[in-house]
Image: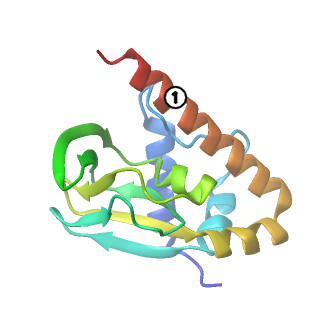
C-alpha cells in the first residue's frame, strides 16, 4: 500500500462536501479524510488528458474510478456511433460503478472533457480493502448504491 497524496484526498473530500444537492456524490456519513486516505491507499492515481477516453464501451475491466478533479462525460454508443452525452461527471463521485458491481462489460464510453485526476480501484484491490476494513467497505458499497439509485432516478426523469 502506498500513501495517497494528502492534497489530492483533500480535494476529493472538499468536492463531496461542496457538491450541489441532486448530484450523485459519494457522500459517506461519518467518513473523515483519514478514511478516504485508507481507501485510496488501495487505489492507483490516474491522470487523463482532456479528450482522452477513460472507459471504453464493452471493455471487460472491473474497476471503479473516483473523480478528484476535472470533468468527465459519459457517452452512449450504439455499434460504433456515438449517440451523445448521457451525463457530465464532476469531482466528488465515481464512474464505472455498474461494471464494478456486476462484473459485466462496460455499458458506456467515458472521456475527459477537461484534464482530470482520479483514483482507480480495481476489484481485487477492493477485496483486499474489504478484508482489512469490513465496516468501511460496507459503507462504500452503500454509497455506491446511492449513486447508482440517484443516476437511475435522474435518467428516468429525462424525456
The answer to whether residue 28 is visible is no
Give the percent coordinates (x, y) of residue 61. Answer: 48, 69
The residue that disc 1 covers is 150
Q: Nearer the viewer, residue 55 or 115?
A: 55
Q: Quadrant of residue 68?
A: bottom left
Is 42 left, or right, of 10 in this rendering? right
Q: Is the residue marked by circle 1 packed among few (<14), some (14-19), or many (20+) residues within 10 Å?
A: some
The residue that appears at 22% across and 63% down in the rendered structure is 115
Q: Secondary structure at mark 1?
A: helix
Q: Nearer the viewer, residue 159 or 46?
A: 159
Give the percent coordinates (x, y) of residue 44. Answer: 50, 77
Give above or below for 69 relative to 82: below
Q: How is the image coloured?
A: rainbow
The answer to whether residue 118 is visible is yes
Quadrant where the N terminus is found in the figure: bottom right
Give above or below for 111 relative to 29: below
The residue that appears at 47% across and 47% down in the rendered structure is 93
Q: Quadrant of residue 19?
A: top left
Is 28 left, or right, of 156 in this rendering? right
Give the percent coordinates (x, y) of residue 30. Answer: 73, 42
Quadrant where the C terminus is found in the figure: top left
The residue that appears at 83% across and 71% down in the rendered structure is 132
Give above or below for 7 relative to 18: below
The residue that appears at 25% across and 64% down in the rendered structure is 53
Give the percent coordinates (x, y) of residue 13. Answer: 52, 50
Q: How many marks?
A: 1
- The outermost residue toward the front is 79
Q: Nearer the viewer, residue 102 or 23?
A: 102
Amino acid at each position: 500500500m502506498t500513501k495517497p497524496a494528502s492534497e489530492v484526498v483533500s480535494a476529493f473530500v472538499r468536492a463531496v462536501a461542496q457538491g450541489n444537492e441532486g448530484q450523485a456524490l459519494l457522500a459517506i456519513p461519518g467518513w473523515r479524510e483519514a478514511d478516504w486516505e485508507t481507501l485510496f491507499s488501495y487505489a492507483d492515481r490516474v491522470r487523463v488528458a482532456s479528450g482522452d477516453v477513460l472507459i471504453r464501451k464493452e471493455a471487460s475491466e472491473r474497476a471503479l474510478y473516483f473523480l478528484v478533479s476535472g470533468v468527465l462525460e459519459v457517452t452512449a454508443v450504439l455499434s460504433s456511433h456515438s449517440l451523445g452525452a448521457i451525463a457530465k461527471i464532476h469531482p466528488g463521485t465515481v464512474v464505472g460503478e455498474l461494471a464494478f458491481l456486476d462484473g459485466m462489460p462496460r455499458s458506456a464510453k467515458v472521456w475527459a472533457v477537461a484534464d482530470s485526476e482520479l483514483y482507480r480501484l480495481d476489484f481485487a484491490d477492493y477485496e483486499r480493502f474489504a478484508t482489512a476494513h469490513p465496516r468501511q467497505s460496507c459503507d462504500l458499497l452503500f454509497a455506491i448504491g446511492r449513486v447508482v439509485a440517484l443516476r437511475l432516478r435522474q435518467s428516468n426523469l429525462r424525456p
